[in-house]
Amino acid sequence: MPGTVWSGRKSRPRRRRGKSRRTVPSGCARRSKVRPVDYEINANKYWNDFYKIHENGFFKDRHWLFTEFPELAPSQNQNDLKDLLSENKASEVPACRSSEDGSGLIIEEQHSCSSVSLGHKTHPPPVEENVTQKLRHLEICADEFPGSSATYRILEVGCGVGNTVFPILQTNNDPRLFVYCCDFSSTAVELVQTNSAYDPSRCFAFVHDLCDEDKSYPVPGDSLDVIILIFVLSAIIPDKMQKAINRLSRLLKPGGMMLLRDYGRYDMAQLRFKKGQCLSENFYVRGDGTRVYFFTQDELDTLFTTAGLEKVQNLVDRRLQVNRGKQLTMYRVWIQCKYRKPLLSNTS
């Protein structure tokens, strides 16, 4: 934000007798008096209320996407995927970068990277698997669905009011690109659809509950090149995260990528929660009724690999933000992940 610069000074917290102002949470000693199930049942109401209040003025467009996730940039897409499929070569591990926050806030980041390069053993798949893949391919070709004629498809889950989708559409003019976006909140999706930048010929926005096992996505399996999860997985109950990732994984093409950026353990937001806001371990409720979980790298790695995806990147992004105007020092912790669907599936 304007007027924000590096500063060696820190805000002086008011001293409390016998207590420090902030402490690192130990598990979840302070539980909410409200039953967690009440927040689960009314989750739709809380998120609709959030977007009715803030509309499209709460978040800024995420133009940093193309720095952190070059897979979304125009120079990427199907050419790179064709090279990957034809050569079956090992991926290069993306280098850790420093950047400047899009809001103008000058930051310094420390990346603790945990990533691996991928190498695939080309074992011929079973006969049953070959038949299944051929049938599935025929279904994709035969069925008509939004974006069925596109050759590069991106889905963002938890799109909010389009702060990720619209920068992608504005930056990438490739006519072969089609972008899907969904959100739990019907209010948010309506704001996307009524935005002047929304183009139904290139984008399809729809309401979808990430945790609803009975409701399918409007695309066939093995049809998406990229799935984006930005500060959305943390908003659902931890017990439902694995099945949600499993369902999304089945939508990816072989070689397709799942991209995530979300809250890390001991982020400033976690340390600021007050008594009664903890629903379960590392899972909290905000004052507006929306919820948030704080991840570790290992937890996310387990979620993705259990869904059959291979790690390309899994890093911690630690940033020190200093606002001179408000005399406020903020220690942010985010986790960024990239996981790929294997070219040859080992599961039938």
Image: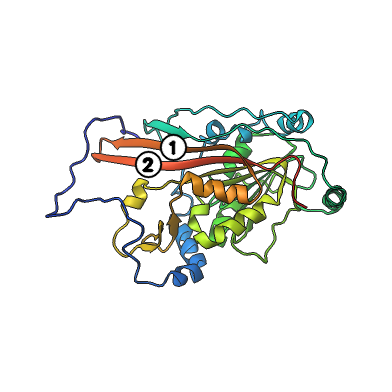
Pointers 1 and 2 in contact (C-beta within 8 Å): yes
Which residue is located at x 58 percent, y 29 percent? 93
Decide: is 268 above or below 51.
above
Asked if residue 327 lies left or right of residue 291, the reply is left
Disc 2 residue type (three-letter): Arg
Give the image quarter of residue 279: bottom left
Nearest to the observer: residue 33 or residue 239: 239
To which residue does mark 1 refer? 317
Q: x, y (%) of residue 160?
A: 53, 52
Asked if residue 230 lies left or right of residue 182, the reply is left
Q: x, y (%) of residue 65?
A: 54, 36
Disc 1 residue type (three-letter): Asp
- The N terminus is located in which quarter? top left
To which residue does mark 2 refer? 332
Q: Residues within 10 Å of mark 1 (few under 14, many from 20)?
A: many
- At numbered mark 2, what does the secondary structure look like: helix, strand or loop? strand
